[in-house]
Amino acid sequence: MKGIKNIVFIGLTLGMLIYAVPKLKTTGLDWSLESVFGIGWIAFALLVVAAHLHQLLGVEEETKRELLKVKRMKRWKMEQALQGRRKLLQVKK
């Protein structure tokens, strides 16, 4: 269900881009207010599409899983080090 929302928003944003890009004046070498607005608007719309694709592909969830693995490994190494110290202390007594 979560993916459907992202697909709908990507579709709406791409529809806006298809409709609006031909009407925006972005050509030419002058930095008029109209061309700056057009380029900014297109960049923002592409940013929205990229954000929804990022969410849809689950990149963040994969990163969270990788970080959890790293944390577990660090915890395991710390436990091994503590157990080794305890054994050394027991042998010295």
Image (spheres, rainbow, N blue to C red):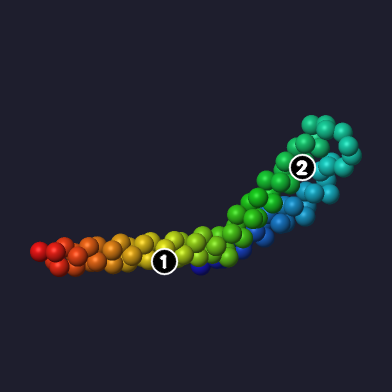
User: What residue sits right under mark 2 in the picture?
Assistant: 39
User: What residue sits right under mark 1 in the picture?
Assistant: 69
Tally the marks.
2
Image position, residue 26 (x, y; %): 83, 42
Q: Earlier in the sequence, mark 1 or mark 2?
A: 2
Judged from the image, the secondary structure of the residue bearing numbered disc 1 is helix
* Residue drawn 50% across the image and 65% down it: 62
Q: Nearer the viewer, residue 69 or 56?
A: 69
Q: Nearer the viewer, residue 49 or 1?
A: 49
Q: Residues within 10 Å of mark 1 (few under 14, many from 20)?
A: few
Instruction: Specify whether 34 is left or right of 89.
Output: right
Instruction: Specify whether 81 is left or right of 89.
Output: right
Image position, residue 20 (x, y; %): 78, 48
| Image vertical order of residue 24 relative to residue 84, above or below | above
Q: Nearer the viewer, residue 60 or 20?
A: 60
| Rendered image quadrant of residue 75 | bottom left
Image position, residue 30 (x, y; %): 87, 33
* Residue drawn 10% across the image and 64% down it: 93
Which amino acid lies under the numbered mark 1 shown in the image of this protein?
Answer: Lys
The residue at the far left in this view is: 93
Which amino acid lies under the numbered mark 2 shown in the image of this protein?
Answer: Ile
Q: Is residue 1 visible?
A: yes
Distance from disc 1 to disc 2, alpha carbons, whole Å, reads 42 Å
